[in-house]
Structure formats: structure tokens, C-alpha cells
Image: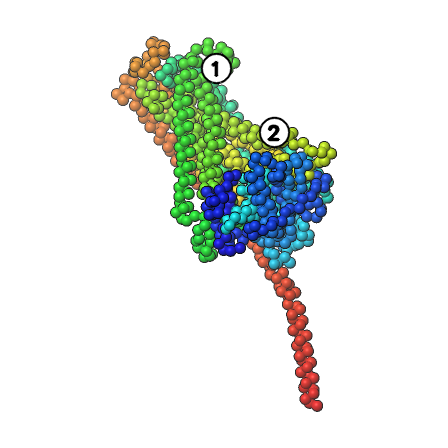
């Protein structure tokens, strides 16, 4: 091929402009020179391509091999026979056939071996089995920097402290007779020219099936499928998108609930289901090494993180449950709650109307709400909030240590970004040259500096637009809350309106009904915006064109989390920090849009509404996600099995056809699983001061979530292409950011949302001024409510439909203001500023104490355990020694014939010289 040859990724459209193609100009496609793809090989245009040999099914449903029983299947391609397609679209299908045949011929030219087999379920389907021969495995193992064993690791690791509890913990571990511990080896990146250095006992089993699947997929993503002039198109991704192939996937090794009849089958899928994915194993430790070996490091690290997070949640859940029980126990003994419910105190306090259409109401009507509030708004909540601020730091620091151990055990310590190959979509659009700042070598890139800035600007602008759209929806929900509150205040004022709701009549207040309906509406808006924004975020990330798969996922992760953060948490932030803070006073209320009067909090504060909102969103999200993750895949597979009947009832379908009936793996992989857990982590940490039961609910959900995800992945989905990963990627800094923000939000919730600081100020200060000889909470309710003269109402703003009692001259409202008749009537009094000062002091002191504690813990707890550092250094040293000794043996072995030849030649020369000297003496 010439240097002028051009490569490109094809568009997914079925339409094709041949005139533009001849000119090399196709809309939405970019091209780049051949040398950027070292694995690229193409067949001359117009050449006769080799076709795949087609064989009949051999009747072995558990076989993982070609019909010869020797070559192992490393990947499966599925397509519909174009000759059986609709005649009206024959031209399109014939083009599909040309591309497919060229693609398969290119694969064979690149060294892969193919074999096609018709389906036993559908006469139109053809399954192409892909095998990676040994020589090709060696080539691409070196390209992908796959680490393989060089020598048995005989270094004995120090016994863990937990080994003394083995007699107890053994019941929580998988059956060691079924899942055996892996042999530990020293490893090094494979090199084709130094095969003698590696522990190659059996070539067919040296590279694991997951490694071979990675190699096959790497080649599939870079094999060309069409050549027209100097335009060469490549990649299995676009062939799948355009419909040339229906599916491409590696095989499961057996059925999930039945052992394979093949002797050589490791039955790892069966073991995973039996000891991990089955619901009965919810209490067992996960077999992470087996998960990693079967699914790859990226999925293994996710389940390791989820399991560690769930284990740490157990500690937080116990403390949170104790805090909840403490609040439940004191709800009947709380002095201020008793005053609210007391008919001689709360029953005589007439409260001012909370809207223009509302009437006066008695304080003791909120008796049940005040009792419920004391469960969550007590001193124990403060202790729990501080505990959670420390807990998140300990969780992240110990996760880093655990992650370092996994990196060492799974050989990802030296997994560098340079080892990760570029995405085919990136490679396809490289048209500009630049000098690599590291190597100094000329390389191809898809955009200039200005082009990159333009792409990033478009992405940032789009994300900001959608965030603004969320804020607009929040304003709409606020308007809904205000309108519904006014409406319910009028419709529920008569007990007769609730005669059909007699059992719950006392709980149905305008505030509670508004909070519940607004919470449900907020949840619906959240889910709808999620669906819409997901497509936008993927489009933006595709447009930005990240270089590697990791870069792509990190970029998409950041965009999605920023959106989800605003989407999920905005309503909670509104209730916690905005609602009831800017309301004015009864005579001069603050109105939104000049029409709707801002919402006021219950006399006990907005904390109970925040708790309600959190419970609705967390519960609704968990139910919705579990329906999506469990019910939908199961129903889809059930329908698929119902409509695919075998052509012969006596024939069991082969392994590849059984897997084809399963659901395809999402292109975004584990993104949604991580997103779901990180959003939950935000609810557990950001607003835990208002809902101590959040860790308990999260723990129960995660115990279910681990097994649901495992069951779904093992039984309902095709096997994914294994991928390398060193850590949890962009989610790590996101978690760190959430933990820093959590300290501030919890401190502000306690200070501004709950009523704890005003109560503490009254107890330690104001109670003595009220005539009490000792510190007491008696009289707090009366002290926290200001007076308003009803004659100061603006009659022009009161709706004529409202029939207010004219005999009421004074009503009360929640605030610290001067009474009517005072020279500064209705202005904030000194009590207000004392409370504000106490709140600010509380925030500053708590934040500094917690942040200092977090800093100390981060410093004291190293990210990598000392023993792991020593083992890594020791392994590097021994690996170098082993490789050096192997090289010396190899050099010695190769030089031995030469040295023997030289010595024999010297012996002959010396013999001849001796003979000549003897002859001269004669």
C-alpha cells in the first residue's frame, strides 16, 4: 500500500453517495494516513477475497471449539444471510454482503481463523466463529502489554490479623473446594522474541480466555471492511451500528446453572452463579479473583469497590440506627414538643395565615409533625453528622489502601495510559500532524489546538444549557408547591372534606400533602431529564473525540455527574437552604414573580420536609433502578426465547446461539452502576444530618444491589469484552469532592434547616432571661414565635373568599422580630442576631474541626500499605534478576556452538603449527 492511502470510519447510514466517495468527501467522516494504524492490513481493490468456510452444527451444545475440536472460539460474529433478505432492499443488502465478506477476508489476512455455522433457531442467521492462533496471540499480547507469569512467587506473605478469626469468617467465604486460590507468580509484559523467559507449559492455555477475547476484539476494531480508491474503512463498531452484523461478543464458558459436559471447560460462569450471583449468597464475601479472571479487571474493581463501600456502610448504618432509636425514645419527653401539643400552650397560640387564601390556625394542629420531627432533629443528629464527616474520610483512605492491594495482586501497578491503545473512532479522524511532546516523534491527531478548544467550548456550553434547564424546572416545581399549598389550604380547611380519609385525616396537612406531591413530581422530572440528557452527553463526548477509552469514560462521567448532581440534589438544596429563609413577615410577605408568596417552614423547621424528600427520591430511585436492572432484561429474554423456536426439536442449540439470545452489554459498560452508587453516596453523606436512616436504607439496597448486578450479569447478559483498569477512574476525585462538600452541607443543615441552634441558644442563654432559675427548654415555643397585629394586614391583598375571624387581634409567626407598637416594630430583634451569630460560629467551628480531623487522618493513613510497597519493590528486583538470568542462559546457549567452533578451530590451528614446527626441525 502507498503512503497516500486513506483510512476512515464509515457512517452508520444506509445511504451512500458514490460520487462523493470517489472524491474522498463523505459528510461526517474524516480520514487519516495508514501509518497511524500498525495493525491495519487491506486487500487490493478488485481482488478476489477469500470466503469463510461454512460447516454444519456438530450437535455439541457445550462445545467452545471449532468443529475440529482443537481450535478454541475466541469471539463470535452474527449476521443475517443477505441472500434471504427482502428483494426490495436487495441493493443495500448486497452492499452489506460485500462489506462483510471483505471484512472477514481482512481478518483472515491478519492471521485470524474463521468458521461459519448456520443457526438452528433461525435459518437466516449465520454465526461466524473467530479463533486467534498462537502466533497472532504472541503478537498482540506484546501490543497490548499483557502481563504473564515468568516464575512462581515463593515469597510468603505475612499472615493477616484477620486470620485469627478464620474459624468464624470461613462461613462467609465462598466454597474453597469449588473456587480454589490462584497460584501467585512473578509477572512481566509478554515479548514475542523472549518466549523462553515465560512459563509456557501449554500454548492453548497460556493466555486465558479473557486475554484472548481482548486480542480478538482489538483486531476486530481495526480490520478494514471496504476499499474504494484511496478510501479504506474499518472497524467492527460501525458494522454493528449499520446492521452488517447483528452482534459481536465473546462466549460464556457454560450455562449459568448447569455444568458443561466438556472436560476442558473450567465452568467459571457456573461457579460464579453458584457462589456469587445466587441470592442465597447475599451474606458471603465476593470471589473477586474469579470475577476478575472471567470478566476482566474493570468489572472486578467495580465489585471490589461496591463490596468495600457496603461493608463500610454497615458501620454507618449501626450508628445511624442508634441515633434514630435515640430520637424515637425522646419524642414523648421533649419539652418543646410537649408545649406544641399542650392544649393550654399550643392550643391557645393562634398562628398567622401562611398564604393569602389561608385562614388562622392553631399551633397544636402540628402536634404529630413536631413529634416526628424530634426523631430526626435532636442532639444525636449532630453527633451523627460529625461522625459521618469522619466516616467518609476513613472510607476513602482505606479504599485507597485496599485498591493498592488489588493493583498489586492483579498486576495493574504499572498499567499506564501509554499502554492503552487509542479508540478506533479517534484513529479514524487523525488528519493533522504534530510533534509528540514526550517522544519528539511526528504523530497524527484529529484536531488542532484551536479545534480542540472549539470542541470543548461546545461541550461546556451544552452542559451549562442543560443545567440551566434543570434550574428552570426547579423554579417550575417551586411555583407548583406554592400554588398547591394555597389550593390545599383552602380545600382542607374543613374536616368534612376528609371524611373519606378518616384514618389519615390527622396526618394530611397542607404542608405534608404539598411536600409529598412535589417530591413525587420532582422524581418524575428527574427521571425524564435523565433520559434526555443521557443522549446529549454521549453526543457531546463523541464530538470531543477523546483519545482512549479511559479518557472517553472519564469525560462522559464528569458531564453526567455534573448534570445528575444538579438534577437529583437541587430540590433537596432548595428545601434545606432556601425554603422558609426569605419570607418576610405576615404584613409584608416576599412573593415570587410578584404573585406567589414564598413558602414558609413548619413551626418546627423545614427538616421534616427535607427528610420526606430524601426518602421519596432514595426509595423511588432504588425501586426504579431495580425494575430496570432485573425485570426488563428478564422480560426481554423471556420474549426472545418465546419467539425463537428451534427448527428441530431434537437439537439443543450451541453455546454461541444460547448467548445470542441474551441481552447485549451496554456500550457504556459499568457507567450506570457507578453513577447509581455515587448518587446514593451523595444522599448518604450530603444530607445525612436530616435523615440518619439513609445509611441503613443504602446498606439494605446495596446488599440487594450486589447480588442483582451479579445475577443480571451472569444470567441475563452476554459476556462482556474484558478490559484492564487500575482504579475506579474519574469516580475517585468525584467521591473526594462529595466528601469535602458534605462537611459544609451538614453543618449548614444543622445551623439553618434544623431548629437545634435556636434551641441551644435558648437553653444556655435566653431561658435565664425568661425568669427560669436554671437552664430549661420551658417557654421555648413562645419565645421563638413573634407577635403580629391582625389590623396591620393589607385588606386589599386578602381574598374575599377567605372568612377570617374578626375577633382575633394577635397572631403568631415563626421569627425573631419586635412586636407591634414597638418603635422598630416587625424589624429583627437582638435575639435574631444572637441566633445568627451562634449559627455562623457553629458552622466555622465544626467545619474547621472536621476538616482538621480529615487532614490528620489523610496524613496518618498512607494510600499504599507499607507491606505492599515492600512487596512491589521485592517483586521488581526479583523480576529483573530472573529476566537477566534467563537472558544470560539464552545468550550462553546461543554462543555455545560458536565458542565450540572457535575452540575446535584453534585446536586445529595449533596442531598444524605444531606439525610445521616439527617439520622445520627435521
* Mark 1 burial class by Cα count in 10 Å: few <14, some 14-19, many 20+: some
106 or 268, which lies in front? Answer: 106
For residue 511, above or below residue 865: above
Measuring 50% from the left and 52% from the top, which residue is drawn there?
5
Q: Is residue 781 above or below residue 555?
A: above
> Which residue carries the number 2 mark?
635
Q: Residue at x 44, y 51 (%)?
A: 432
Q: Are marks 2 and 1 in contact (CB under 8 Å)?
A: no
Q: Tell me the CA gap for discs 2 and 1.
A: 42 Å
Query: Viewed as shown, does residue 653 lie left or right of 616?
Result: right
Q: Quadrant of residue 543?
A: top left
Q: Position of residue 665 (x, y in %)?
A: 57, 38
Image check: 653 left or right of 720? Answer: right
x, y percentage for residue 227? 53, 48
Q: Residue at x 27, y 17 (%)?
A: 821
Q: Residue furthest left?
A: 823
Q: Nearer the viewer, residue 533 or 559?
A: 533
The quadrant of the image that shows the C terminus is bottom right
Task: Find numbered disc 1 in the image and state the secondary structure of the residue it sits on.
Answer: helix
Numbered badge on residue 709: none
The residue that mark 1 highlights is 506
Judged by depth in the image, the label closer to the viewer, 2 or 1, is 2
Amino acid at each position: 500500500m502507498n503512503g497516500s492511502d486513506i483510512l476512515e470510519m464509515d457512517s452508520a447510514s444506509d445511504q451512500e453517495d458514490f460520487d462523493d466517495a470517489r472524491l474522498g468527501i463523505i459528510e461526517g467522516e474524516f480520514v487519516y494516513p495508514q501509518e497511524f494504524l500498525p495493525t491495519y492490513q487491506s486487500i487490493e481493490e478488485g481482488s478476489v477475497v477469500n470466503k469463510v468456510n461454512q460447516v454444519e452444527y456438530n450437535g455439541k451444545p457445550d462445545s467452545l471449539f471449532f468443529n475440529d475440536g482443537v481450535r478454541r472460539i475466541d469471539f463470535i460474529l452474527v449476521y443475517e444471510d443477505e441472500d434471504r433478505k427482502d428483494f426490495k432492499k436487495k441493493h443495500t443488502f448486497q452492499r452489506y454482503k460485500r462489506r462483510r465478506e471483505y471484512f472477514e477476508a481482512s481478518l483472515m489476512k491478519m492471521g485470524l481463523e474463521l468458521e461459519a455455522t448456520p443457526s438452528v433457531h433461525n435459518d437466516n442467521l449465520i454465526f461466524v466463529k473467530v479463533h486467534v492462533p498462537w502466533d497472532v496471540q504472541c503478537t498482540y499480547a506484546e501490543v497490548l502489554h499483557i502481563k504473564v507469569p515468568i516464575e512462581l512467587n515463593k515469597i510468603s506473605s505475612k499472615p493477616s490479623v484477620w486470620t485469627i478469626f478464620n474459624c468464624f469468617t470461613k462461613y462467609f467465604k465462598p466454597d474453597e473446594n469449588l473456587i480454589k486460590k490462584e497460584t501467585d507468580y512473578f509477572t512481566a509484559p509478554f515479548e514475542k522474541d523472549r518466549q523462553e523467559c515465560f512459563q509456557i507449559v501449554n500454548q492453548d492455555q497460556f493466555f486465558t480466555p479473557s486475554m484472548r477475547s481482548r486480542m480478538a476484539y482489538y483486531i476486530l476494531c481495526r480490520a478494514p471492511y471496504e476499499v474504494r480508491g484511496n478510501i479504506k474503512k474499518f472497524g467492527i463498531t460501525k458494522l454493528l451500528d449499520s446492521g452488517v452484523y447483528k452482534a459481536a461478543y465473546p462466549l460464556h464458558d457454560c450455562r449459568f446453572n448447569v455444568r458443561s459436559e466438556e472436560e476442558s471447560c473450567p465452568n467459571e460462569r457456573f461457579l460464579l452463579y453458584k457462589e456469587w450471583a445466587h441470592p442465597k449468597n447475599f451474606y458471603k464475601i465476593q470471589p473477586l479473583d474469579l470475577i476478575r479472571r472471567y470478566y476482566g479487571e474493570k468489572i472486578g474493581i467495580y465489585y471490589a469497590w461496591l463490596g468495600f463501600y457496603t461493608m463500610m456502610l454497615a458501620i454507618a448504618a449501626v450508628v445511624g440506627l442508634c441515633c434514630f432509636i435515640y430520637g424515637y425514645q425522646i419524642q414523648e419527653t421533649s419539652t418543646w414538643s410537649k408545649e406544641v401539643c399542650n392544649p393550654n400552650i399550643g392550643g391557645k397560640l393562634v398562628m398567622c395565615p401562611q398564604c393569602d387564601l389561608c385562614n388562622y390556625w392553631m399551633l397544636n394542629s402540628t402536634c404529630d409533625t413536631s413529634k416526628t420531627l424530634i426523631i430526626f432533629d435532636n442532639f444525636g443528629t449532630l453527633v451523627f453528622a460529625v461522625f459521618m464527616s469522619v466516616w467518609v474520610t476513613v472510607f476513602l483512605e482505606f479504599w485507597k489502601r485496599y485498591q493498592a492491594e488489588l493493583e498489586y495482586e492483579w498486576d495493574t501497578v504499572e498499567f499506564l495510559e501509554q499502554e492503552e491503545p487509542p479508540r478506533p473512532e479517534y484513529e479514524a479522524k487523525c488528519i493533522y500532524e504534530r510533534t509528540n511532546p514526550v517522544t519528539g516523534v511526528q504523530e497524527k491527531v484529529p484536531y488542532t489546538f484551536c479545534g480542540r478548544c472549539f470542541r470543548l467550548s461546545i461541550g461546556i456550553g451544552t452542559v451549562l444549557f442543560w443545567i440551566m434547564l434543570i434550574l428552570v424546572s426547579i423554579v417550575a416545581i417551586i411555583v407548583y408547591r406554592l400554588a398547591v399549598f394555597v389550593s390545599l389550604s383552602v380545600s382542607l380547611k374543613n374536616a368534612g372534606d376528609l371524611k373519606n380519609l378518616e384514618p389519615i385525616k390527622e396526618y394530611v396537612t397542607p404542608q405534608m400533602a404539598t411536600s409529598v406531591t412535589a417530591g413525587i413530581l420532582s422524581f418524575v422530572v428527574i427521571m425524564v431529564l435523565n433520559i434526555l440528557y443521557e443522549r446529549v452527553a454521549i453526543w457531546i463526548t463523541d464530538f470531543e473525540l477523546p483519545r482512549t477509552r479511559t479518557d472517553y469514560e472519564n469525560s462522559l462521567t464528569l458531564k453526567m455527574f455534573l448534570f445528575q448532581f444538579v438534577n437529583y440534589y437541587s430540590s433537596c438544596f432548595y428545601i434545606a437552604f432556601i425554603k422558609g429563609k426569605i419570607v418576610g413577615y405576615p404584613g409584608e410577605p416576599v412573593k415570587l414573580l410578584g404573585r406567589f408568596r414564598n413558602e414558609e417552614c413548619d413551626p418546627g423547621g423545614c427538616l421534616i420536609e427535607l427528610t420526606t424528600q430524601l426518602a421519596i427520591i432514595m426509595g423511588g430511585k432504588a425501586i426504579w433502578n431495580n425494575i430496570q436492572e432485573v425485570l426488563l432484561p428478564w422480560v426481554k429474554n423471556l420474549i426472545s426465547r418465546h419467539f425463537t423456536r428451534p427448527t428441530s426439536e431434537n437439537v439443543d442449540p450451541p453455546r454461541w446461539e444460547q448467548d445470542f439470545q441474551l441481552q447485549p452489554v451496554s456500550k457504556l459498560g459499568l457507567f450506570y452502576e457507578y453513577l447509581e452508587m455515587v448518587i446514593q453516596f451523595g444522599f448518604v453523606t450530603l444530607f445525612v444530618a436530616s435523615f440518619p436512616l439513609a445509611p441503613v436504607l443504602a446498606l439494605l439496597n446495596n446488599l440487594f444491589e450486589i447480588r442483582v448486578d451479579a445475577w443480571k450479569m451472569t444470567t441475563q447478559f452476554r459476556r462482556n469484552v474484558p478490559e484492564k483498569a487500575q482504579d475506579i477512574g474519574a469516580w475517585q476525585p468525584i467521591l473526594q469532592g462529595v466528601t469535602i462538600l458534605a462537611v459544609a452541607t451538614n453543618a449548614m443543615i444543622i445551623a439553618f434547616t434544623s431548629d437545634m441552634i435556636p434551641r441551644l441558644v435558648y437553653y444556655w442563654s435566653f431561658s435565664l432571661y425568661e425568669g427560669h432559675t436554671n437552664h430549661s427548654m420551658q417557654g421555648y415555643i413562645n419565645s421563638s414565635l413573634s407577635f403580629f397585629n391582625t389590623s396591620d394586614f393589607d385588606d386589599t391583598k386578602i381574598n374575599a373568599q377567605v372568612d377570617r375571624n374578626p375577633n382575633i387581634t394577635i397572631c403568631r409567626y415563626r421569627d425573631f422580630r419586635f412586636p407591634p407598637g414597638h418603635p422598630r416594630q416587625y424589624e429583627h430583634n437582638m435575639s435574631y442576631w444572637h441566633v445568627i451569630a451562634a449559627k455562623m460560629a457553629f458552622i466555622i467551628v465544626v467545619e474547621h474541626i472536621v476538616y482538621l480531623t480529615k487532614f490528620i487522618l489523610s496524613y496518618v493513613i498512607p494510600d499504599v500499605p507499607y507491606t505492599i510497597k515492600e512487596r512491589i519493590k521485592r517483586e521488581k528486583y526479583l523480576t529483573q534478576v530472573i529476566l537477566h538470568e534467563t537472558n544470560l542462559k539464552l545468550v550462553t546457549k546461543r554462543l555455545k556452538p560458536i565458542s565450540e567452533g572457535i575452540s575446535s578451530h584453534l585446536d586445529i590451528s595449533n596442531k598444524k603449527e605444531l606439525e610445521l614446527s616439527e617439520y622445520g626441525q627435521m
